[in-house]
């Protein structure tokens, strides 16, 4: 099959170096030689025919033979001139033409001298000067003509030697003048031609470079986004015309941003180049990898077989390659990539539809199975349609009316009291019913609607907080998109200020993933929050990269340990160890720590034994309506003591 790489026009190779000027000049003589050959051929043919018509027994025998030899030789020369010749061969052919002419006109003089035929000996000099390409050959030929003329005059008309000396001299001068004029004209023409060739070559090289720049990504040398979409269009056209299915793959690196932030851009660039090399290796000759931008790559591959397992094998090969360690010069780091795959076999779909499906598979891979390959299937298609409906509903809904905020208590085990509430958004859509917050938050982020939504939710949370006791704080979740927009941050800080509540009572929760997209922008936003007097909690700690760099470089005052570790803590020794390590990490760094998702007394017991102080979860209280917060605070709410017989996993179990 034709490789997709061929869909991209090949960059033109710069043409080979031009011939040296001297050789070019000789080659330019080719048409002159050719013209002269034809003229002399006709002259000899005319001579031959006249001899046949008006025979002269004195000398016609040798002359007819000479004519025939001359005609044959010139025909051969004419034939040779139609082919590619070296400059040496060209010079030789020029000599042969001159020799034929010379012998034809002088043989008759030798056989039967006639004074009026001496004019041919003189005329031959400018003819040779015109014909011969090399100066040296002209000098030799003209000299021979002079000698021949001198000899003929000396032998037959010795008393006219002086007169013919002048004629010979005039012949030489004319030859020199003609040689110079013709040579100059040829040299100038050649120079002009060579310059034109050079200009064309430069233009071709520049055009090739421009094409390369327009089609390839400068860093990785892979086809860029533009080339990729052209290739996708062309593959789709072939699917429609020939029914040839293909595979579309989208690849997104997991953890590229932290590498860039931690080790610098040079290391990040090296990582991207390595990814490009590895993808090219996996793609082989038949597939086309491309870089779409940032840490996003794509692949178009032939699909000789559309069996799910076969297609997934390609994804697994990519996965395996991307999880090999990366040698970044001074550092070596680990990495992985999520892969979304789509079998493109439906000619009804547009490139936009194909990209949307592959992107959804990638989104699923990133969300659920980071570092794995996911093939788009019917379930994902259903999910994609549903998320399309959510997007639509979100665009036309009334935020004030449809969104509410619930509050989940956070409990201090030392003070044995509720010290704050986390605000958690809820959406009851008249169209769709209740939509889960992680679903609609992600949809709002995708649709660029998170900023107004955050404003409405924050306003509602602050309003609810107005009659809370002064020692009860609010934790409010900010989206990564809020942090990335200085205007959104302005609005958030303005809204809190306008509420009149002290900044110290409002904490903002930020997930680690928020830091990944643009660490510097996130740091700037977090510094602003902190300078305004709010505390910042790093949410879902342990799920992402748990980078110490974030903790050291940011004014974070609290870690929130994700509930996934707590739920497994009793059965999974590694979750237990993670919780224990994160608790001691927060103590070492002098940071507060909230353990999320505490559901059972057994969990609470272990956490207490590990020195945990702040907990949140259904055991303390589920997210509640604003009206239930005050009753909850007034009720003496203390989690029951965990059963003493349930302890942390034994060290031996922990090692298992
Ligand atoms: P999160 O910030 O990690 O919120 C904690 C989630 O854990 C909440 O889910 C909460 O209801 C749930 N949870 C609390 N205790 C327990 C427990 O003991 N067991 C279990 N199984 N779950 C518990 P929810 O309300 O569904 O929120 C999900 C996510 O949606 C939140 O995770 C947060 O990332 C996002 N979210 C919610 N509200 C907002 C908001 O106002 N703004 C932003 N940007 N994100 C929000
Ligand atoms: Ca949270
Ligand atoms: Ca959380």
Image: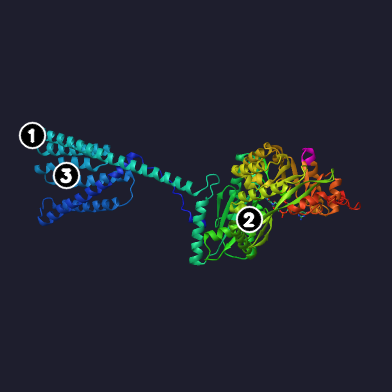
Residue stretch in magenta: 585-591
Q: CA distance from mark 1 to mark 2?
A: 110 Å
Point out the frontmost of discs 3 and 2: 2
Most extreme residue toward the top, as rendered? Answer: 162
Q: Secondary structure at mark 2?
A: helix
Percent from the top left, x then y, of residue 254?
65, 49
Q: Residues within 10 Å of mark 1 (few under 14, many from 20)?
A: few
Percent from the top left, x then y, of residue 530?
69, 38
> Which of the two labelled residues, at mark 3 and mark 2, occupies the earlier sequence position?
3
Q: Which residue is mark 1?
A: 159
Q: In screen coordinates, is 143 left or right of 202?
A: left
- Image vertical order of residue 619 relative to residue 142, above or below: below
Q: Which residue is mark 3?
A: 106
Pick whichever, 272 or 168, lies toward us.
Answer: 272
Percent from the top left, x then y, of residue 484?
61, 44
Q: How is the image coloured?
A: rainbow
> Which of the two labelled residues, at mark 1 and mark 3, occupies the earlier sequence position?
3
One can see residue 144 in this view: yes
One can see residue 372 in this view: no
Q: Residues within 10 Å of mark 2 (few under 14, many from 20)?
A: some
Q: Residue at x 10, y 39 (%)?
A: 156
Q: Is residue 308 located in the magenta-colored stretch of the structure? A: no
Q: Residue 501 occupies which quadrant of the picture?
A: top right
Q: CA distance from mark 3 to mark 2?
A: 94 Å
Pick whichever, 476 or 129, lies toward us.
Answer: 476
Q: Residue at x 52, y 51 (%)?
A: 225
Q: Ligand 1 near label 1 (Cβ, under 8 Å)?
A: no
Q: CA distance from mark 1 to mark 3?
A: 21 Å
Q: Secondary structure at mark 3?
A: helix
Q: Which residue is mark 2?
A: 363
Q: Residue 170 occupies which quadrant of the picture?
A: top left
């Amino acid at each position: 099959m034709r490789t997709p790489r061929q869909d991209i026009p090949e960059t033109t190779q710069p043409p080979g170096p031009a011939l040296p000027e001297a050789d070019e000049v000789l080659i330019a003589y080719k048409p002159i030689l050719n013209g002269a050959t034809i003229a002399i051929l006709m002259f000899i043919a005319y001579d031959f025919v006249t001899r046949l018509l008006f025979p002269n027994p004195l000398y016609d025998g040798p002359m007819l033979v000479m004519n025939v030899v001359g005609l044959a030789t010139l025909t051969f020369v004419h034939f040779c001139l139609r082919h590619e010749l070296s400059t040496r061969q060209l010079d030789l052919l020029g000599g042969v033409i001159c020799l034929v002419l010379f012998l034809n006109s002088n043989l008759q003089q030798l056989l039967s001298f006639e004074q009026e035929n001496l004019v041919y000996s003189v005329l031959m000099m400018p003819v040779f000067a015109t014909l011969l390409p090399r100066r040296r050959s002209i000098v030799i030929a003209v000299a021979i003509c002079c000698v021949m003329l001198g000899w003929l005059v000396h032998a037959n008309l010795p008393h006219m030697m002086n007169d013919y000396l002048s004629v010979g001299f005039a012949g030489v001068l004319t030859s020199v003048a003609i040689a110079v004029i013709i040579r100059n004209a040829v040299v100038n023409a050649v120079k002009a031609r060579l310059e034109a060739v050079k200009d064309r070559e430069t233009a071709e090289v520049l055009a090739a470079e421009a094409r390369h720049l327009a089609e390839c990504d400068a860093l990785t040398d892979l086809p860029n986004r533009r080339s990729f979409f052209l290739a996708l269009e062309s593959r789709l056209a072939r699917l429609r015309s020939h029914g040839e299915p293909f595979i579309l793959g989208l690849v997104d690196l997991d953890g590229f941003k932290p590498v860039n932030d931690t080790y610098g851009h040079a290391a990040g660039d090296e990582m991207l180049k390595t990814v490009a090399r590895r993808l090219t290796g996996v793609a082989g000759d038949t597939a086309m990898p491309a870089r779409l931008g940032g840490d996003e790559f794509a692949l178009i591959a032939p699909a000789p077989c559309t069996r799910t397992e076969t297609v997934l094998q390609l994804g697994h090969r990519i996965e395996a390659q991307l999880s090999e360690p990366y040698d970044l010069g001074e550092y070596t780091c680990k990495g992985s990539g999520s892969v979304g795959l789509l079998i493109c076999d439906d000619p009804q779909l547009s490139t936009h539809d194909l990209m949307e499906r592959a992107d959804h598979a990638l989104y699923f891979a990133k969300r659920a199975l980071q570092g794995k390959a996911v093939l788009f299937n019917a379930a994902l298609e259903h999910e994609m349609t549903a998320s399309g409906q959510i997007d639509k509903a979100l665009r036309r809904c009334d935020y004030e009316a449809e969104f509410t905020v619930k509050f989940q208590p956070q409990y201090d085990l030392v003070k044995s009291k509720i010290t704050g509430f986390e605000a958690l958004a809820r959406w009851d859509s008249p169209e769709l019913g209740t939509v889960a917050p992680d679903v609609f938050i992600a949809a709002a982020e995708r649709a660029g609607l998170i900023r107004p939504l955050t404003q409405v939710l924050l306003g509602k949370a602050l309003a609810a907080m107005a009659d809370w006791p002064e020692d009860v704080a609010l934790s409010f979740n900010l989206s990564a998109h809020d942090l990335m927009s200085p205007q959104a941050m302005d609005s958030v800080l303005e809204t809190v200020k306008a509420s009149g509540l002290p900044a110290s009572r409002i904490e903002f929760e930020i997930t680690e993933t928020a830091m990944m997209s643009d660490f510097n922008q996130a740091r700037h936003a977090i510094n602003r929050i902190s300078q305004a007097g709010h505390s910042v909690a790093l949410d879902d700690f342990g799920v992402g990269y748990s980078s110490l760099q974030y903790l050291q470089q940011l004014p974070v005052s609290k870690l929130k340990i994700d509930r996934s570790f707590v739920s497994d803590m009793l059965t999974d020794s590694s979750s237990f160890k993670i919780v224990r390590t994160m608790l001691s990490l927060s103590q070492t760094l002098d940071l507060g720590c909230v353990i999320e998702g505490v559901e059972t007394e057994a969990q609470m017991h272990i956490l207490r034994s590990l020195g945990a102080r702040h907990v949140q979860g259904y055991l303390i209280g589920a997210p509640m309506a604003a009206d239930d917060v005050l009753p909850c605070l007034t009720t003496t709410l203390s989690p029951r003591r965990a059963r003493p017989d349930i302890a942390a996993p034994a060290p031996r179990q922990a090692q298992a």
